[in-house]
Image (tube, helix red, strand yellow):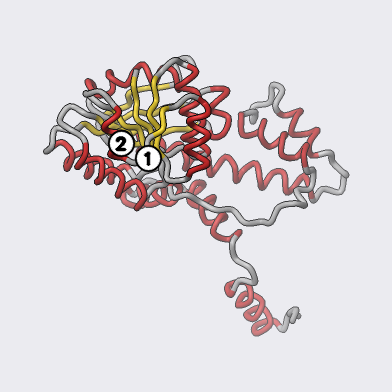
Amino acid sequence: MELGFVGLGRMGGSMVTRLLRGRHTVVGYDPSPPAAAAAQAAGARGAPSLAAVVEALAPPRAVWLMLPAGAPTESTVAALGELLAPGDTIVDGGNTRHTDDVRRATTLSARGIEYVDVGTSGGVWGLEHGYCLMVGGAAAAVARLAPALETLAPPDGWRHVGPVGAGHYVKMIHNGIEYALMQAYAEGFELLAESAYGLDLPQIARLWTRGSVVRSWLLDLTAEALAADPRLDALKPWVDDSGEGRWTVEDAVEKAVPAPTIALALFARFRSRRDNSFADRLLAALRNQFGGHAVRR
């Protein structure tokens, strides 16, 4: 099928390459010249603007966005809403908050424009192995996109999970679970690293990928990371978050659903960014005040 694609960075560029390998036609746009040039080198038709993307596509058009959540996606959806025609479709494959999807779809539907949200998982490995796609939107709009979804995903790797917003909601919970899984591996391997037994962490990680009940793709990646740097000396203990973990915890609070493991995993990421934290200094001061315990100046 013919598809416009906006956002040709690390994820978007790989997705375009996979689509081109599947013999789809892609008209790509990115404000970054190197990203745009790389997509064109892979076989995409380049466009110098959003308007040029729309002009290059035959109706009914479909334009897929792979942009950072928030202002970049918001402004691009608004601009495309002015450029596209009734019967066209905007697809947001980034990490948008599901409530934003519902709001945008309501606005666009008044103009006859369809909106489909696609939660996308697979990271930098998706080009080779395919992307797990969680799709929200009207059935007819999703059916139109099926050829592209089949190409982007591995076998049985995409599902129409519900109406607009459902795709990104499922992806949000997926990422909340991911936070907790990663935190469990991190804590367990820190205990192994502090053991008196002189353990070979890369060897243990590889061992656990063979038949263990804790095996997973994340553990495979753990083994790769430790093989490259067994003590992770090249890294600083700073762990960022891109929003989905926060939204998952907020959703749990709103619904009064206990999700302590996911919440603590999110807070652990916040803690990783604290250098010389005030809270820790206060803890030391309090121990000194009530018990005369020594402090380090």
Sort mark 2 into few (<14), some (14-19) or many (20+) by Cα contacts within 10 Å. some
Q: Nearer the viewer, residue 257 or 33?
A: 33
Q: Nearer the viewer, residue 192 or 95?
A: 95
At horizontal 58% and vertical 61% (from top left) the residue drawn is 271
User: What residue sits right under mark 2 in the picture?
Assistant: 52
Query: Where is residue 106 shown, x and y percent of the image?
Result: 17, 40
At horizontal 47% and vertical 29% (from top left) the residue drawn is 15
User: What residue sits right under mark 1 in the picture?
Assistant: 48
- Circle 1: residue type: Pro
Compared to residue 33, the image places residue 214 above or below, namely: above
Sort mark 1 into few (<14), some (14-19) or many (20+) by Cα contacts within 10 Å. few
Image quadrant where one finds the C terminus = bottom right
Circles 1 and 2, Cβ within 8 Å, touching? The answer is yes
Q: Nearer the viewer, residue 60 or 136?
A: 60
Compared to residue 29, the image places residue 291 above or below, namely: below
Q: Secondary structure at mark 2?
A: helix
- Circle 2: residue type: Ala
Q: Tell me if I can see residue 172 in this picture.
A: no
Q: Nearer the viewer, residue 93 or 20?
A: 20
At horizontal 25% and vertical 23% (from top left) the residue drawn is 58
In-image side of 166 versus 184 (left or right): left
Which corner quadrant of the image does residue 275 belong to? bottom right
Compared to residue 12, the image places residue 258 above or below, namely: below
Q: Secondary structure at mark 1?
A: loop
Q: For the residues marked 1 and 2, what is the alpha-carbon distance in whole angstroms?
A: 6 Å
In-image side of 139 versus 176 (left or right): left
